[in-house]
Structure formats: C-alpha cells, structure tokens
Image (cartoon, grey):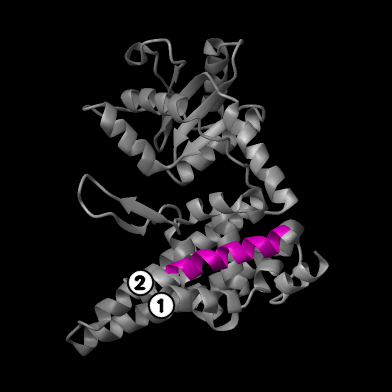
Amino acid sequence: MSKELKQKAGQQQEQQQERIWQWFGVDVSKGFFTATFYDGLSDISKSEAVNFDSNRKGVRRFLSWRKKHANMLFPTAVVMESTGYYSDRLADLMLKLDSSIHVSICNARSVSYYIKSHAVNKTDKSDARLIAKYGYDFQPLKIRVRSRDEKLLRELVSERGKLVKVVTMLSNKGRSLEFSETKAVNKSVISHLKEKIKELDKKIAEASRLSDEMDAEIKLMDTVPGVGRLSAAVIYAELGSLKQYTQLQLSGLSGLFPAIRQSGSSPTKSKLSKCGSKYLRQILYLDATKAMEKIPALQDMRKRLLARENSSKMTARCACMRKLLLIIEGVVDSGIPYDPNFQQKKQRFL
C-alpha cells in the first residue's frame, strides 16, 4: 500500500471514529419529503415528523426546523435512502443552501431491510423515523458532492446503459418472433436505438473532457490494456474519482468480492456479493475478457484459479475483474500510465 493510500485509509478511519449523536432522517418522495430526528435517548415512535416540499423554499423551511431542534452540544447529520434522482436533487439543494451540513445517502436495499426488521406498518413518517435510527446505528459517511460535469457524465452513462439493456431485450425477443412483419418492426426499433447509443457515445466522449481532472483520470485508465475511453468514462461516472477510495472500499463498491453463506452444519458456500453498480460489473466483465489476453498478472491469476479443485471459469473471470479494477485504481493513484514492467522496475530500485 502506497503512502498516499495509507493516509487515505487513516483519514477514513478518523471519520468513522467521530460519532454523530443526532440524526435527522429524511424519507424522500417525488414532490415532498418527510423529516424527523433521533438522538438515541428519546422515544423514536414519538418524535415529531414534518412534511416539506422538495424545492428551495421547502428545503429552507427544513433547515430552519432542523436548526430549531438540533442539539448544539453534539454534531448532527442528515440521512436519507437512495432513490436516484430525487434523493440526489434533494441532497444538492440542502448543500447549496448550507454547505456545512453532513448529508448521507444510504444504500436503498440496506435501509429497506432495516425498516422491515423494525416495523410492520409502512408510512412516510414511520420510514423517516427508522431512517434516522439507521443513521444513528450505522453512522454512514458524508457524501462527496459531484460537480456539474460529473453529474452530466453520470446521467449520459446511465441513459446509455438503459438503451443497451432495451436493445439486448429486443434482440432476444426477436429470435422468438414468428411473422416477418413483426420481425421487421423489431429490427427497425433496434436499429434506431443503436443509432441513439452511438450519439450518446459521442456525447459521453465530449462530457468526459469537460473537466481537466476528470479527463486526466480517464486518460490514465485508458492506458490499461483492455480498457477503452468509453469504459473508462463509465467507471468514472459510476464511482467518481478512484483516488478517494482504498482498494478494500473499491472492492466493496463494485460488488466484486465473495459473500459467504454458512449456517449450522450446512456446508459453507460463497458467491459474488453483487452489491453496487450492475452496469460497472458489466463493463468490467467485457474489459476483463480483453485484458486477460494482454496483462500478464491477469493471465497468471486465471491459470492459477482454473488449476484449483472446484474452481470454474466464471470464478476466475470474476477474480480477474476485481484485479483489473485494482490495477486501474493503482494507475490512477500513481498518476503514471500503465507499465507492464512497473513491478520489476520498482524492485530494481528497492
């Protein structure tokens, strides 16, 4: 681990040690949000829950209400469940009006399971209360504010992913169509969508160059064999700057680590956790196919894993996907283009 990486991990640990004692839970809907608070001492079922409009005026009202109920002796934070556009927009509004507040956006699945384990009934107010308690129990980290250029890139990449999914679905469906009239419509729609995907590819290439920092990082990723400019842009759009993560965090965010399943005398099983971005894993799956032919470290890993008993081609591929992501992170973190002889040169100077 590099010195810079160790500093990054140390800073992360310090953040985790600073416990926040009062959490304002926010349940986000389309046109409004419901907010309440929890400090570990009061009865969560009786805490005040108030609705606010999801606009600038409503957020100002929320910030005034939060200030009124905040404990001035302890740090406070706002926590909400990830709902895509609506939670991102609300968090942006809050931070624009008060850049000093701690805002956390948490994994929707984790929050959902937590709420289901604590309550039978489901209302906006009960959800807000349990989201506040979730924040108190798990102490989620503050979100990193994305720039306008990053948001644009992310939205373009997201739209491309949706169109690719529709094209795949229609292509699969086309194989089962019986009549030529229906097949012609199917092919026409697929052809139109592919043209739109090409247009998006151009817009993604343009958007990836809007920021010098973003462009520099994507160019470094592009030097890794098997990783093209488009793939690099997708990785950046899904994860943001790779410099902000440790390798352990990166593995967790990508979902490329084994989740162990064991209970009593039942045999222990493991499978890919599949947390995080599915689209990111799809891109890494395609890139790893090419990279395994060009990067010696991946070739050796694949051979070693395939030689193991009970191993499979998919197990080896997933391990190579994770290794490829960590190689990309190492290149970005060092600021030096990919060099296949880097380790040998490093050993020579030690």
Magenta residues (range): 318-333
Q: Which amino acid lies under the numbered mark 1 shown in the image of this protein?
A: Ala
| Residue at numbered disc 1 | 307
| Residue at numbered disc 2 | 311
Residue under the point 36% across and 43% down: 109
Question: Would you say 337 lies left or right of 192 here?
Answer: right
At numbered mark 1, what does the secondary structure look like: helix, strand or loop? loop
Quadrant in the picture for the N terminus: bottom right
Q: Which amino acid lies under the numbered mark 2 shown in the image of this protein?
A: Ser
At numbered mark 2, what does the secondary structure look like: helix, strand or loop? loop
Please name whichever residue, 324 or 168, is drawn nearer the observer in this view of the structure. Answer: 324
Q: Are marks 1 and 2 in contact (CB under 8 Å)?
A: yes
Please state the horizontal and vertical placement of residue 77, each as a whole percent of the image.
55, 25
| Residue 323 part of the magenta-drawn span | yes
Please state the horizontal and vertical placement of residue 37, each as a whole percent of the image.
45, 18
Residue under the point 33% across and 38% down: 112
Is 234 rendered above or below residue 5?
below
Secondary structure of the magenta portion, mostly? helix
Residue 167 visible in the displayed image:
no
| Residue 42 part of the magenta-drawn span | no
Please state the horizontal and vertical placement of residue 13, each as a whole percent of the image.
61, 36
Q: Residues within 10 Å of mark 1 (few under 14, many from 20)?
A: few
